[in-house]
């Protein structure tokens, strides 16, 4: 977490230095509000990824390979049967993650555009008040928030679908393991039925 905070701070400083080195024409397309939004939101996502997600990824990879090694040692036949859950889990996770990243980017873009609009309006509040454009500018800002909310809603639905697919595959794999484990017990390959239950819950 300390490394993530330091790296995020360095990224913020480097981003701000790069922005300040740009020509004036660059800021015709990039508003001041977008700069502040990118510095805060994007670097916070980067910090979260470095602080928490890296540790969780290392933990998950270590558990994955350790579980397979132990499973092949204990009962290689059942391991070969249950290995089919890997593509069944990987495919929906990859697809839903790509969709979530797409809508997350859209949501951040809408927030950045709304922040730019708010920054410009506050900077020229006298002009906005003189021409009585407060309501029109407020509606324009609300439109950005509505679009960001839509992207966030789609992302929430995709997360729900992802969790459904993950737990469906896990419970289906448990059912498959119970069925194949029963066959191995009947055939005499496994003598202790408790091994099947222990194996399934360690494996899943």
Image: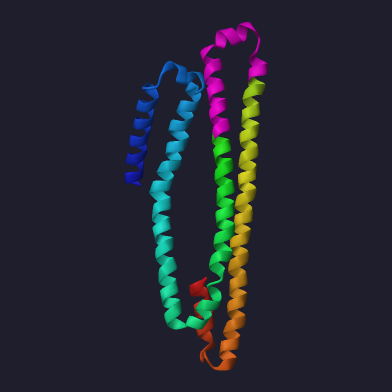
With 6 as the anchor, is 41 left or right in this view? right
Residue 199 in percent (x, y) is at 50, 78
With 182 as the anchor, is 10 left or right in this view? left
With 39 as the anchor, is 180 left or right in this view? right
- Residue at 57%, 93% in the rendered image: 187
Compared with 181, 67 (above or below) is: above
Compared with 175, 113 (above or below) is: above
Compared with 193, 72 (above or below) is: above
- Residue at 45%, 41% in the rendered image: 45
- Residue at 59%, 92% in the rendered image: 186
State the predominant SS element of the stretch in magenta. Answer: helix
| The stretch drawn in magenta includes residue 41 | no
Q: Nearer the viewer, residue 199 or 100?
A: 100
Rendered image quadrant of residue 59? bottom left
Give the tally of numbered discs: 0
Rendered image quadrant of residue 132? top right
- Residue at 41%, 50% in the rendered image: 52
- The region drawn magenta spans 109-137
Compared with 78, 59 (above or below) is: above
Residue 163 in percent (x, y) is at 60, 57
Q: Nearer the viewer, residue 140 or 25?
A: 25
With 29 as the anchor, is 179 left or right in this view? right
From this viewpoint, which residue is outermost toward the bottom?
A: 188
Q: How is the image coloured?
A: rainbow
| The stretch drawn in magenta includes residue 117 | yes
Residue 30 in percent (x, y) is at 49, 23
Residue 71 in percent (x, y) is at 45, 77
């Amino acid at each position: 977490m300390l490394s993530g905070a330091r790296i995020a701070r360095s990224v913020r400083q480097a981003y701000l230095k790069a922005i300040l080195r740009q020509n004036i024409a660059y800021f015709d397309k990039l508003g001041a509000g977008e700069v502040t939004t990118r510095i805060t939101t994007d670097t916070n996502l980067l910090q979260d990824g470095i602080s928490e997600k890296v540790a969780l990824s290392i933990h998950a990879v270590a558990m994955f390979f350790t579980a397979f090694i132990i499973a092949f040692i204990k009962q290689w036949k059942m391991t070969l049967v249950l290995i089919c859950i890997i593509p069944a889990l990987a495919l929906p996770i990859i697809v839903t993650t790509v969709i979530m990243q797409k809508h997350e980017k859209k949501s951040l873009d809408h927030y950045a555009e709304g922040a730019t609009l708010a920054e410009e309006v506050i900077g020229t509040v006298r002009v906005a008040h003189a021409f009585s454009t407060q309501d029109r500018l407020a509606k324009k800002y609300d439109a950005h928030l509505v679009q960001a909310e839509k992207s966030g809603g789609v992302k929430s639905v995709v997360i729900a679908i992802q969790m459904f697919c993950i737990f469906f595959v896990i419970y289906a794999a448990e059912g498959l393991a119970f069925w194949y484990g029963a066959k191995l017990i009947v055939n005499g390959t496994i003598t202790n039925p408790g091994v099947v239950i222990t194996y399934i819950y360690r494996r899943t």
